[in-house]
Amino acid sequence: MTVTLTDRPIETVRSEVIDQLIMNYSHGELSYEAFERRLDQAMELANHQDLVDLTSDLPLAVDKAFVESKKQDLAPNYVAGEAEELDYMVNIFSGSNRGGVWRVAKETRYLSIFSGTDIDFTDAQFSQEVVRIKMFSLFSGDTIYVPENVNVVSKAFCIFGSIDNIAPSQTRTSTVNQNSASRPTIIIEGFSIFSGVSIKVKRSMKERFVELADGLKKMFS
């Protein structure tokens, strides 16, 4: 049976087009302006043929080594070993920031009272697929940063407060073309009382693609 272009999942086609854009930009076949413009289009277009047309004039095809390199660069940061059971953050009339490279425990509990708490998972190391954050936020402003390739499920309760979750979830599709089951999931539980909690992506997927492309361009220059 012949498989047509439209029979293929559009996210697979999108991922292949983005790979080819990165490949040609990194080897000098596309200017930065053209690469960025086409990348924006590749991440937005919803038609198979329109996606394919973005790279129809490009000379370089994607090789296996590039695909493997991209998977490693964009994949969640898993490390071997057993994660700690519990981690704690306590802020009362104060503020703290957990970020950089750090090992994520199975469960993180944080207390924020008249405070500000930032938890940044952008470069965090995961040892398992599901981790939990149990929070109690009172008269506070807290921010949780997550990478684009990490799922977030919010189950926290708000009492005269708010939780603004604009991070990825299991029902959203990623342009990295990864199975969501292989991506870490952060489950957030607890209470936000007279507080505001923001859950958002610190570095967008486009920024990660551009960072990867720039790194390869420097390597090939």
Image: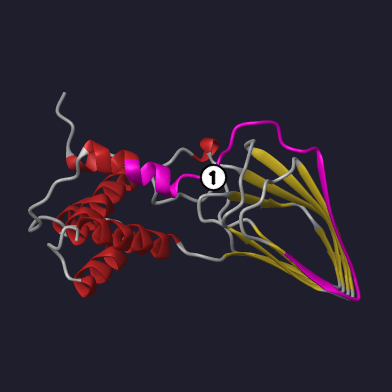
| 76 left or right, relative to 43 | right
For disc 1, the marked residue is 77
Q: Position of residue 88 (x, y in %)?
A: 84, 52
Residue 85 lies in magenta, yes or no?
yes
> For numbered disc 1, what is the local secondary structure?
loop
Q: Is residue 134 above or below residue 141?
A: above
Q: Position of residue 216 (x, y in %)?
A: 28, 56
Residue 45 appears in the figure = no
Residue 215 lies in magenta, yes or no?
no
Q: Residue at x 14, y 46 (%)?
A: 61
Q: Nearer the viewer, residue 7 or 67?
A: 67
Residue 150 appears in the figure = yes
Q: Residue at x 25, y 71 (%)?
A: 37
The C terminus - image quarter: bottom left
Q: Nearer the viewer, residue 119 or 166?
A: 119
Could you tell me how many numbered marks the image carries? 1
The colour mode here is secondary structure
Amino acid type shown at disc 1? Asn
| 49 left or right, relative to 9 | left
Q: Position of residue 135 (x, y in %)?
A: 83, 57
| 158 left or right, relative to 39 | right
Q: Residue at x 29, y 41 (%)?
A: 67
Q: Residue at x 59, y 49 (%)?
A: 151
The N terminus - image quarter: top left
Q: Residue furthest top?
A: 1
Q: Position of residue 132 (x, y in %)?
A: 75, 45
Q: Residues within 10 Å of mark 1 (few under 14, many from 20)?
A: many
**Quadrant of residue 217 in the image?**
bottom left
| 119 left or right, relative to 221 | right
The residue range painted magenta reads 69-97
Q: Is residue 139 above or below residue 104?
A: below
